[in-house]
Image (cartoon, rainbow, N blue to C red):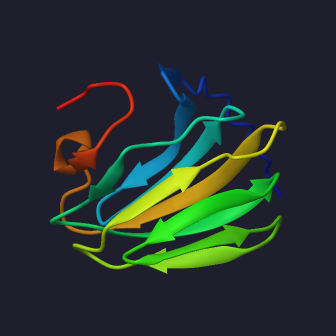
């Protein structure tokens, strides 16, 4: 049996609310780690071409899905349909981290439609 060791450098992209890392990307899906700093939140947004699945791996996230807002504890998960308005927030004093799995034919960052943003981004 042969063992192969894969060494990769995963680039962390800084954002005003925290950071993200793309862990894997192949045709049809992308996996990201997303960290949200205490008291920060991502834009209220939707996507035309992808759905998402979120799993909380650190802390307790505040999630907006359409008209609903709820806490998502460690190990909690939710699905976001194509076109569904959503937001990830950290209302605690501890870091929040999720794993996001995106599904769709197009997974580019320019498929983010921001409806509200604390940082003035279009």
Q: On screen, 101 above or below 41?
A: below
Indicate the quadrant where residue 92 lies.
top right
Quarter placement of the C terminus:
top left
Q: Nearer the viewer, residue 20 or 96?
A: 96
Is 106 in front, or is 26? 106
Taking the image as shown, residue 45 lies to the left or right of residue 70, namely: left
Near-viewer residue (26 or 47): 47
- In this rendering, the count of numbered labels is 0
Residue 54 in picture, x, y percent from top left: 57, 66
40 and 8: which one is in front? Answer: 40
Q: Does residue 64 appear to the left or right of 49 in the view shown?
A: right
- The x and y percentages for residue 111 are 18, 50
Residue 11, position as x, y percentages in the image: 53, 23
Residue at the image position 27 percent from the left and 67 percent from the top: 50
Work out which quarter of the rendered image holds the N terminus and state it: bottom right
Report x, y in % for residue 16: 48, 22
Quarter of the view holding residue 8: top right
Residue 6 position by quadrant: top right
In the displayed structure image, the side of residue 6 where residue 63 appears, left or right: left
- Which residue is at a point 66% across and 35% down the rendered structure image? 39
Residue beneath the point at 36% across and 25% down = 119
Q: Residue at x 80, y 47 (%)?
A: 3
Q: Compared to 82, does 59 lie above or below?
A: above
């Amino acid at each position: 049996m042969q063992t192969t060791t894969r060494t990769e450098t995963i680039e962390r992209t800084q954002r005003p609310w925290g950071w993200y890392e793309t862990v894997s990307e192949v045709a049809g899906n992308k996996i990201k780690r997303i960290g949200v700093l205490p008291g920060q939140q991502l834009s209220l947004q939707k996507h035309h071409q992808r759905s998402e699945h979120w799993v909380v791996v650190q802390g307790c996230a505040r999630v907006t899905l359409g008209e609903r807002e709820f806490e998502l504890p460690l190990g909690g998960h939710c699905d976001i349909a194509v076109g569904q308005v959503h937001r990830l927030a950290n209302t605690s004093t501890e870091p929040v981290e999720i794993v996001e799995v995106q599904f769709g034919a197009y997974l580019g960052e320019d498929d983010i439609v921001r409806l509200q943003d604390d940082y003035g981004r279009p």
